[in-house]
Image: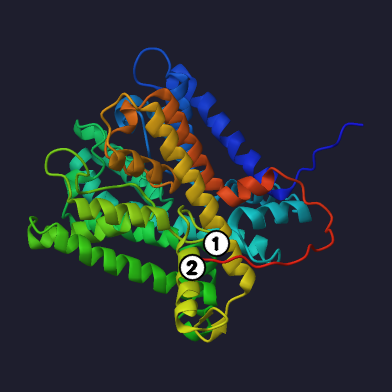
Amino acid sequence: MQRRIRMTPTRLLVLGYLAIILIGTVLLLLPVATKGEGSASFIDALFASVSASCVTGLVLQDTYMYWSLFGQIVLLILIQTGGIGFMTVVFAFWKLVGKRIGLKGRTVMQESVNAPALSGMVKLTGTILLGMLIFESIGAFVLCFRFVPDFGWGRGIYFAIFTSVSAFCNAGFDLMGAAGTEFASLTAYSGDPIICITVPLLIIIGGLGFFVWQDMRENRFHVRKYSLHTKLVLVTTGALILVSWLIIFIAEGDLPIGERVLSAFFTATSPRTAGFNVLPLSGEGSVKTVTIFVTIVLMLIGGSSGSTAGGIKTNTFAVLMLSVASCLTGKRSVECFGRRLDEDNVKTATQFVTLYLLALILGIVLICLFEIRSDFGLTEIVFEAVSAIGTVGLTLGITPQLTIASQVVLAILMYLGRVGCLTFMMSLHTPSAPTASLPMEKVRIG
C-alpha cells in the first residue's frame, strides 16, 4: 500500500514559497514584463523571481533598464509578499472575505513567522500589516523629497514607493538605473542625509521583527516589561550597528567627514540584510578590504527572527555568544537580563547555524568548481554566496558574469536563506512516534 505524504506546516511553508517563485517566474516570462523585444530568458526570470520572493536583491539584469513597468510591479508584489511572509498575505485575504482561520492555518502562520505560540496569530497579523503600511508610507513620503526633484513628480513618487517597500522588506532592489548607470544602487547619494538616514531606518525597523514591534507597542517605554527576545534583539542590533559603523568610519578615511559619517552608518546597516549600497563595493574607488570583511560578517548575522530580514539572525547570534560567555565564566546555564535561557534554545541555535554554514560551504565549493576556468577570486565568490544565503543582495559585480550553474546555486541559496535551512530539512521528513532512549555516552569536545 502506498504511503500517504503528510502535509506538515513546514512542508506547506516550503511549498508555498516555491509556488510564489513559480508564479513570479511565469509572469516575468511574459513579453510585457521586459522593455526589449521578446521575453526574458528562463534563468533571468527565475533568478529575479527567487531574488524578489526571498527579498534578496541579487539580479542578473538592471531592474529599471531591463524590466518594464509591469515587470517592476510584479517584482514589487513579490518583494512585499516575501517580506511580510506569504502566510500573512493569506491570513489578510481570509479575514477580508470573512473566512474563519482554522488551527492548521494558524499553525502554518506560526511556522512562517517563527512565533513561540499559536495564540495571538490574528492579532500579530494585524500588527504586521499596520506596521507595514505606516512605516512604508512614512518612508515613501520622506524619500519623495529627494526623488521628486531628481526624477519629476510621477517617477519620483513611484521611485520613492518602490525604494521604501524594498528597504522596509530588506530586499535591496532599486530603480536607480533610470539615471543611466546600471547596477548603481544608491551610490549617487553617498552622504545625502535623506537617503543615508531614511533607508537605513527602514531597514532597521523591518529587520527588528514583528514580535519586537508588538512587544514595544504594548509596553511602550516600560523597558523592564520587554520580553527577553526583545531585549536581546535591541541590544544586539544596536551593538552591531555601532561597532561596524566605527570600523567602517575609520577604514574609509579618504571621504569627507560629513559624507563618511552618513555613508558609514548606511554601510553598517544595509548588510543586515537589505543590499543597498552608497559606497562602491568593486571597481575604481571601491571600499577597503576591512569594509568588505565587516560586510560579510554582517551579512551572515542578518536581522532578527520573525522579521523581513535573513541571516542566522541577531537573536541566534546573541544566544551563541551568551553560551560561549557562560562557558568562559563557568556557569552551568546560559543567563541574560536576569533570566535563564531554555537549553533547547541553545541546542536549536547550534543546529540552525551548523546547517546554515554547511549549506553555505557547499554552495561556495560548487560555485568554485563551476567557475574553475574563470578569473574570479575566492573573496568574490564567498561574498556572493554569503549575500545570497543571507538574502542580502550586495554584490562585488560578478553575479551576472557567472555561469548558469553558479547562478542556479545562488538561487538555491537565496531560497534556503528565506525559508530557513532547518525548516527545509524538517520538511523532508515526517515526525515519527517516540522510541526508547539509547544508552548515553559522552565524547570529547575541543
- Identify the image quadrant of residue 351: bottom right
Counting from the top left corner in percent of width and height, residue 323 is at 50, 73
Q: Residue at x 47, y 74 (%)?
A: 322
Q: Residue at x 53, y 72 (%)?
A: 229
The label shown at residue 368 is none
Report whether 58 appears left or right of 196. Answer: right
The N terminus, quarter of image: top right
SS class, disc 2:
helix
- Identify the image quadrant of residue 172: top left
Residue placed under numbered mark 2 in the picture:
320
Assess whether mark 2 and mark 1 are in contact (beta carbons under 8 angstroms): yes
Counting from the top left corner in percent of width and height, residue 23 is at 57, 30
Counting from the top left corner in percent of width and height, residue 115 is at 62, 62
Q: Residue at x 35, y 70 (%)?
A: 238
- Disc 2 residue type (three-letter): Leu
Q: CA distance from mark 1 to mark 2?
A: 7 Å
The label shown at residue 350 is 1
